[in-house]
Image (spheres, helix red, strand yellow):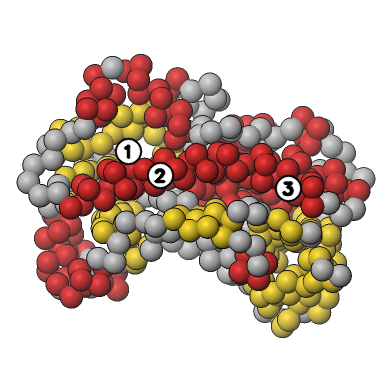
């Protein structure tokens, strides 16, 4: 494989944005190479929520029946525990979609599903253990990618490079595109806790003064997120594992009796939360999408689904220009024009929640009183549809265009 290859479009990153965009373009007959730096997708991803907007895209592609055969859990309502009380804050069962729920599915299963469907397309090529390292430029334009593969250096010439390689994107770094960063007052400590047969299976969000804890059911264990003030992790480690156990037990509810499964800080990992976005997503021959274009906060768990919405928009806009040759900068700019407003609005809401709810809660002591909005959502069932629509569909949800669905490969 090492040496030189050529294609119509090369996508750096085999995450949700890269795999979905690659599949859609290949389905329309565009020759696509997707690079994934790991040997497989079997890694401990953080985001395992497949929202109704993404499930609707999968339905439009005629893949929903097969997708729902993959093991998953279905969440129709959002619940939050504040102090000793449980509130219902969201109801997905009234959404105008085929799937009126969030599907909890390990991200590696989502990626394996997309990869298997894409591999059946003759113009789709997935190169595992191949990492983008630099851009190839010619006459002031991006003309491809340099990569490091298992067999050695690889140059891939392409009419378009798509950077979908996450919040630490090599493509973004090498592109020189301008980036705007937003201050974030929180970080997240990720950990696993054992599952017991008597446990519930829906996600659990617990809020108390000085504590914020989320538990996601993973089938045979709980994937947990402990929200802490920005930079607090080093202090927590200095306090020792015993103090950490007490901190967890104070907010873990039914799982408080098993926090000693965390034997040392080697059993946890820190997600340094960042919120940023490119002010310009493209330059000639190059487009960034997903976290490479806009790193999202974990608030709402919407990052994966926004990335997939970017992929759908990019494929809808670019499949024809790509089949005809090289998309113009104006073509690429249409993707940002389509997706920037949803990203900006979502990030604004995330920053608002981080700064005005999450951070103050972590500084509180004593008893925490439930906010009025939570009480209203719990008391008036109709109002629960509003946050469910915001989380489940988001702003300006994308649909696969009829033209793309009907495209016949040349």
Q: Nearer the viewer, mark 3 or mark 1?
A: 3
Residue for point 86% across, 70% down: 139
Q: CA distance from mark 2 to mark 1?
A: 23 Å
Position of 397 with respect to 46 (left or right) is right
Query: Residue 304 appears at what percent x and percent y?
Result: 52, 48
Q: What mark, if any, has residue 350 been given in the picture?
A: 2
Please rate how many residues cluster around mark 3, counting C-alpha atoms within 10 Å: few if below 14, some from 14 to 19, many from 20: some
Residue for point 35% across, 23% down: 384
- Chain-order first, disc 3 or disc 2: 3
Q: Is residue 225 above or below residue 385?
A: below
Residue for point 27% across, 28% down: 373
The number of discs equals: 3
Residue at far left of view: 366
Q: Is residue 347 visible?
A: yes
Position of 81 with respect to 393 (left or right) is left
- Chain-order first, disc 2 or disc 1: 1
Q: Circle 3 is placed at which residue position?
A: 333
Comparing 237 with 153, the one in front is 237
Q: Choose top left, top right, bottom left or bottom right for residue 207.
A: top left
Please rate how many residues cluster around mark 1, counting C-alpha atoms within 10 Å: few if below 14, some from 14 to 19, many from 20: some
Is label 1 in a helix, a strand or a loop?
loop
Q: CA distance from mark 3 to mark 2?
A: 25 Å
Q: Is residue 254 visible?
A: no
């Amino acid at each position: 494989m090492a040496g030189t290859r050529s294609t119509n479009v090369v996508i750096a990153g085999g995450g949700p944005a890269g795999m979905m965009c690659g599949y859609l373009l290949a389905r329309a007959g565009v020759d696509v190479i997707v690079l994934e730096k790991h040997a497989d997708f079997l890694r401990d991803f953080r985001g395992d929520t497949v929202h109704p907007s993404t499930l609707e895209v999968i339905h439009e592609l005629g893949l929903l029946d097969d997708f729902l055969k993959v093991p998953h859990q279905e969440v129709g309502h959002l619940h939050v525990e504040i102090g000793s009380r449980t509130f219902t804050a969201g109801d997905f069962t009234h959404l105008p979609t085929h799937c009126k729920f969030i599907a909890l599915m390990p991200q590696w299963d989502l990626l394996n599903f997309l990869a298997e469907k894409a591999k059946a397309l003759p113009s789709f090529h997935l190169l595992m253990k191949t990492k983008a390292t630099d851009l190839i430029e010619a006459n002031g334009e991006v003309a491809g990618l340099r990569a490091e593969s298992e067999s050695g250096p690889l140059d891939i010439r392409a009419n378009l490079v798509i950077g979908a390689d996450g919040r630490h994107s090599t493509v973004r770094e090498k592109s020189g595109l301008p980036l705007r960063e937003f201050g974030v007052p929180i970080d997240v400590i990720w950990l696993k806790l054992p599952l017991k047969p008597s446990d519930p299976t829906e996600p659990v969000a617990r809020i108390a003064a000085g504590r914020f804890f989320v538990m996601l059911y993973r089938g045979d264990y709980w994937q947990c997120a402990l929200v802490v003030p920005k930079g607090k992790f080093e202090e927590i480690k200095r306090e020792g594992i015993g103090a950490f156990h007490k901190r967890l037990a104070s907010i873990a509810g039914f799982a408080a009796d098993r926090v000693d499964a965390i034997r040392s800080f080697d059993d946890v990992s820190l997600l340094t939360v960042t919120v940023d976005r490119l002010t310009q997503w493209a330059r000639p021959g190059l487009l960034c999408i997903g976290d490479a274009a806009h790193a999202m906060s974990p608030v709402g768990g919407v990052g994966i689904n926004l990335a997939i919405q970017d992929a759908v928009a990019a494929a809808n806009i670019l499949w024809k220009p790509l089949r005809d040759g090289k998309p113009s900068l104006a073509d690429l700019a249409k993707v940002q024009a389509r997706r920037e407003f949803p990203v900006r609005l979502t990030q604004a809401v995330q920053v608002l929640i981080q700064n005005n709810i999450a951070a103050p809660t972590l500084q509180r002591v004593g008893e925490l009183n439930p906010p009025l909005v939570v009480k209203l959502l719990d008391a008036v069932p109709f109002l629960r549809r509003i946050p469910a629509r915001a989380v489940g569909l988001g702003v300006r949800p994308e649909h696969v265009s009829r033209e793309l669905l009907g495209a016949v490969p040349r």
